Image (spheres, rainbow, N blue to C red):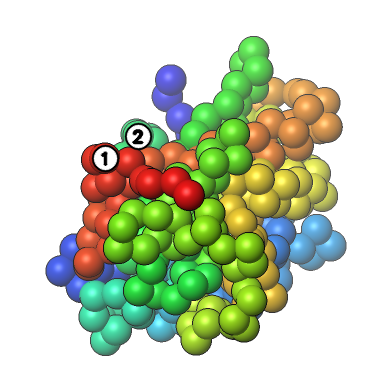
Amino acid sequence: MTLPFKIGHYTDLQNITGCTVILCPDQTVASCHICGSAPGSRELALLAPDKKIDSIQALLLTGGSAFGLSAADGVMQYLEEKGVGYSTSYGLVPIVPAAVIYDLNIGSNKIRPRPENAYQACRNATDDFSTQGSIGAATGATVGKWAGLKYAMKGGLGLSRIALDQAWIIAVSVVNSVGDVLDTSGEIIAGAIDPDRIFLARSRKSKFRSGLISGFGENTVLCALLTNIRLSKMQSYLLARRGQNGLARAIVPATTSYDGDVIFCLSHGQIDLDPEIAYEMGSEVVQMSIIESVRQTQGLGGFPAVTDLAGGTKRR
């Protein structure tokens, strides 16, 4: 299937950071739902349903915490060179919302994605939505930090697709969560783990009986929902908001007051579908992409991945 959207990554495995760019076709209607209380973002106010501009030209997901937001300048440069942007009386202005994860606690905290890195991600962009794991914005992602960073595992970038006849939604999730990741049966598959490979949540009655851990607020899950379902800006917002249900099914705890979670919806409308069906499809595909993010990732920076636990995890 040829997709109208393109995705490109810049990955720095040495410093363990990176960024991911999604290039949008013309007239892509966009909105977002901010789930967490501490987002690191740029241009998100424009995506509110009541704001004038309906469409965007690209979306940037990036590491580097707030420092990484400057990488969006490279995306704007790329689009300007291509003659793409919002038309004004004195030239085109590319609209590029951006959101970040906190990855300064892995690799180098002095090296963050820069404009030239995001520019390269744009040049790398294709319609191949198959590469997952420790790549792009999720290069420095970790999960299960509720017990402290030393117990965490590697997070990643996960992809999932759901379709109904000709209508489809693709979820791209960058999972850098304070919570553990659960499969569809409710079993923990990645999260806070002790040296004996025992998931701590299985052996403790309460995750927070000792109070908040230092660094609790250094967490974010970013998700982009791409669809060919015809949606208004308000409907795009509602689909993004409904995606939070999928996030809460896959991560415990999720969207805490210290998180910067954001879910985007990008609609290149070609197919008509009952919005309520689309919203539920969005919830499911978000959940599955988060599960894939840890199943497909690779260990990095001393943090083990699910694939490193060859013998599985022990239960108590």
- Category of crowding for the residue at label 2, using alpha-carbon neighbours closer than 10 angstroms: few (below 14), some (14–19), many (at least 20): few
Query: Could you tell me residue 214's position as x and y percent?
Result: 50, 86
> Do callouts 2 and 1 mark residues in contact (Cβ within 8 Å)?
no
- Viewer-closest of 315 and 298: 315
Vertically, is 102 above or below 153?
A: below
**Is disc 1 placed on a helix, strand or loop?**
loop
Asked which quadrant contains residue 132, the reply is top left
Vertically, is 215 above or below 121?
A: below
Query: Could you tell me residue 26's position as x and y percent?
Result: 56, 43
| Nearest to viewer (mark 2 / mark 1) | 1
Name the residue located 29 percent from the left edge and 68 percent from the top edge.
17
Horizontal relation, residue 210 to residue 47: left or right: left
Can residue 85 be seen here? no
Horizontal relation, residue 36 to residue 160: left or right: right
- Category of crowding for the residue at label 1, using alpha-carbon neighbours closer than 10 angstroms: few (below 14), some (14–19), many (at least 20): few
Residue occupied by mark 1: 311
Residue occupied by mark 2: 130
Spot the residue most to the left: 14
Q: Of label 2 and label 1, which has the lower sequence position?
A: 2
**Is disc 2 placed on a helix, strand or loop?**
loop
- Viewer-closest of 188 and 18: 188
